[in-house]
Every structure is written in C-alpha cells, then in structure tokens.
Image (tube, rainbow, N blue to C red):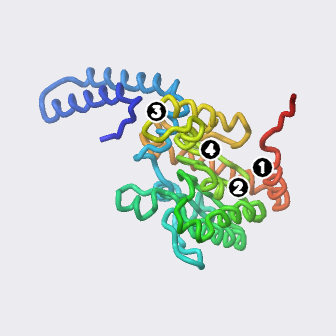
Amino acid sequence: MHYYLDFERPVAELEDKIEELRRLADGRDMNITSEIKKLEKKARDLRADIFSKITPWQRTLIARHPERPYTLDYVDILMEDFVELHGDRRFADDPAIVTGFALFEKRPVALIGHQKGRTTKERIERNFGQPHPEGYRKALRIMRLAERFRRPIITLIDTPGAYPGLGAEERGQAEAIARNLQDMFCLKTPIVSVVIGEGGSGGALALAVADRVLMLEHSVYSVISPEGCAAILWQKDGASIGRKEYENASEALKLTAQDLLQLSVIDDIIPEPLGGAHRNQAETARALGAALKRHLDELSERSTDQVLEERYRKFRVMGALNEGM
C-alpha cells in the first residue's frame, strides 16, 4: 500500500480501482486483463502528466516522502562488506549519521550519510535525521581515516538540518559544522556528495564540500526550509501560513535540482523513476550507482594537487555580485 501525496490523489484513485479488480479476479474465472491494462496505462499517463508540471513545493514533499529510500537502503543495494564505524571519540555516537567503509564496484570507499529512520522508534533514535555535533565529528573522523588510507569518500545527504537543541549548541554545533567545512576542502582524497532527499542548510553542507555534488531528480537543497523561509518573509505563525506561502517561498529559494544545476551549484542530476525514487528503489539505486562510478572514475584520473585545486575553485566561483545605483 503506497502513501500518496495530495497532488497524486487522481492516480491513487485509479490504482485503488486496479487493485480492486485484481482482488475480484483472484482465483475466479474472470477475464478482465484487458480492462486492468487499460487502467494501468491510464494511471501511467496521468502520473506522467502530473509530474511533468510539478512545482518546487511539490518536489519538496516528494523529497520528504516517508517511503523514499534512505542511506542504508542504498548501502544494502550498492555496497558490499559494509562495516559501520561508531562514535566521535569525544562524546558519543550519533545514529543520525551513518559512517563506515565498504566496497563499491569492487572499489574500497568510505561511506557517510544521514539516516532518518522508518519506524517511529527508529526515527526517534535517529532524531529524524537531524545530527548533533558528535555526528559531524564522527563523520570527519571517518573522512580523515579515508584520507590516510587513500579511499575516496561518498556522502549521501538527507536531512532537514542540524539539530538546533540546547544540548547540541552547548556541545558546539556551529563549530563542528564549521570544522567540517574547513577540513573537507583540504582532504587529499576524492569526495562525491549526493543529495538523495532533503538537503537542509549547514546540516547538509557539512557533508557536501565535495569535488562532485549530485542530486536525485526530486531532491531539494537549500539554505532554509520553505516553511522557515515563509515564516520569516511573511512574519506569520505556523497556523496562519498556507500552501500559497510555501509555494512562493519554494520558488524563491531555487531549491530544486534543476534550478541548482542551472546556477552551477551542483554538477549532475540523477534521474528517478516516474513518480519518485520510492516507486522503484532498485531502479533508483542503479542510476545512483552509475553516476557515482562515472564521477569516481573521472576523479581517479586526476592528481591529488589537481583534485584539491579544482575543489577550491569550484566553491570559490559560486555566486555573483551585481553593483548598481
């Protein structure tokens, strides 16, 4: 049973009808195959039409879809011999960030990614994918190990942002993020980052200072959430802000993969199955794996000095300043 977003309701009604016909025909002498095929084609065409004109706010909802594959789903499909490493060697382990070493296409790599959790219990344990400072310090510890053993680094980003709680601030949340940003520029090993869902603010950027930054087709990446942006711009409380404000904020933020590729903030868009990554995890993983392999192969042909110089220039030239009257 799929979870449908509001704008997918017309498709949901058709697919419910298809399932009902299948149940009626199960074990009975009923020839309704042609009717089912017609409805399946109609559902595909309707879904294609809906997804051909989705808005940035609707893409945000897709990026947050509860059935969307998370880091450990991709690890299970794409990686072999994954060994998870825990703890920042200072305070604690943070389950909101998964780290370790694995084989990807027979190549040893370091893998770091946000993990939101599926069940209510797991979401609470992983803090809904919002890392504490020890999560970022754990990630940097693994990155330094990867540098020492000359392993390329893959980061998978999917977080609404770093956890803003009092304890996290007391333990140096801002410093931990800033340290990651600084040190990732100097790591002498290739880094490929992929936004697989939600890339929120510094909590995402702390794992995204990379030689290649990729995004799945329906993921989002922004300095603030549309809800936070809308609350600041229109100075309303949550109850009085509606879809119109969220739509306007999402459009202004330029948070979609398509916008960010055009602005040269990211390097590549990885296609998703029609309807989003959650509709076919295996197909999405294959596309992600192909993109990772292509970019890692390209980076492996460069010298360490060249990789570092290109990484610096990549971020140095982002943005533009227009001066006028």
Report the residue marked by disc 4. Answer: 222
Depth order, front residue of 257/120: 120
List the single residue furthest toward the left. Answer: 28
Residue type highlighted by circle 2? Val
Circle nearer the N terminus (2, 3): 2
- Relative horizontal placement of residue 189, taking residue 59 as reference (left or right): right
Marks 1 and 4, how far apart at CA: 16 Å
Residue located beneath label 1 in the image: 315
Q: Amino acid at mark 1?
A: Phe
Mark 2 → mark 4, Cα distance in angstroms: 14 Å
Contact check, label 1 and label 2, Cβ < 8 Å: yes
Q: Amino acid at mark 4?
A: Ser
Number of on-image labels: 4
Mark 2 vs mark 3, CA separation in Å? 34 Å
**Between disc 1 and disc 4, whose residue precedes?**
4
Judge by depth and name the residue closer to the eye, 93 or 214. Answer: 93
Which dot marks residue 209?
Answer: 2
Left or right of 93? Residue 290 is right
Closer to the chain start, of discs 1 and 3, is: 3
Q: Residue at x 62, y 44 (%)?
A: 222
Residue under circle 3?
A: 242
Q: Quadrant of residue 144?
A: bottom right
Say which of marks 4 and 3 sits in front.
3
Picture quadrant where residue 189 is located: bottom right
**Label 2 or label 4, whichever comes before in sequence order:** 2
Secondary structure type for disc 2:
loop
- Mark 1 or mark 2: name the one nearer the start of the chain: 2
Image coordinates of residue 152 in percent, x first then y, are: 68, 62
User: Are circles 4 and 3 on residues that touch, CB within 8 Å?
Assistant: no
